[in-house]
Amino acid sequence: MYTLLVNLALFFIHDFFVSVSYIEYDDQRNAIEAHKKIFFDDFEKTLKKQFLNEDFDILKSNQVLVDDYIRDYLTNNIEFVINDKQYDFEYLGHEYEDGIINCYFEINKIKKIKKIKIKDTSLFETFEGQENLIYFKANQKLTTIRLKDPILFHEIIIK
């Protein structure tokens, strides 16, 4: 009985590490639009570690530096392969809202998607048990991806 209570207590005090991305193919613009939500404190801890800057404050540091850190971090941790071709995305910026850092980026000049592979290793190096949820929408169809393994791509076939 004691072991059960200890296990239950540990379950409820264990932190949950997750980011959520909303990615949509806009066939009118021929673009993939992305919005990634990351808990403020988790992201700040990761960026401090990544850039070896303990004085970094995601809300109070120079915003050019913050954008540079976020752009570099996301570029090194998110990959897209569309129709068997690797694409880089353009980082558009970020905003802070209610404990969340919202990051915006896009890929332009995508005329048609037959398949897309997405890899997101964000925060895996900092938090054991990290999960990255991705909601991908194309052709009025929504696909949900739950990434728990930092080395794998997830492929979506578009019909």
Image (tube, grey):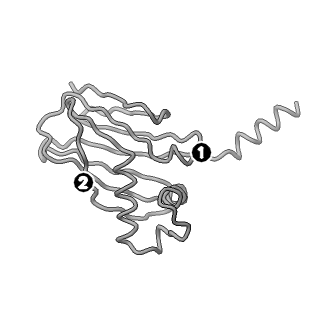
Mark on residue 90? 2
Asked if residue 124 lies left or right of residue 72, the reply is right
The amino acid pointed to by label 1 is Phe
Locate the N terminus by quadrant. Answer: top right
Are the residues tagged 1 and 2 within 8 Å (C-beta)?
Answer: no
Compared with 62, 121 (above or below) is above
Mark on residue 16? 1
What is the spatial separation of the Cα atoms under label 1 and label 2, in whole angstroms? 29 Å
Asked if residue 28 lies left or right of residue 24, the reply is left
Give residue 6's position: percent from left, percent from top: 82, 38
**Which is more N-terminal, label 2 or label 1?**
1
Question: Disc 1 or disc 2, which is closer to the eye?
Answer: 2
Residue drawn at 44 percent across, 33 percent down = 151
Of 31 and 5, the residue lying toward us: 31
Residue drawn at 88 percent across, 34 percent down = 2
Of 97 and 59, the residue lying toward us: 59
The amino acid pointed to by label 2 is Glu
Residue drawn at 35 percent across, 64 percent down = 68
Give residue 28's position: percent from left, percent from top: 11, 45
Residue drawn at 18 percent across, 43 percent down = 26
Q: Residue 121 lies in what quarter of the image?
A: top left
Q: Secondary structure at mark 1?
A: loop
Give residue 16's position: percent from left, percent from top: 59, 45
Give residue 5's position: percent from left, percent from top: 82, 36
Would you call the spot at circle 2 few (<14 residues within 10 Å), some (14-19), or many (20 or more)?
some
Of 137 and 40, the residue lying toward us: 40
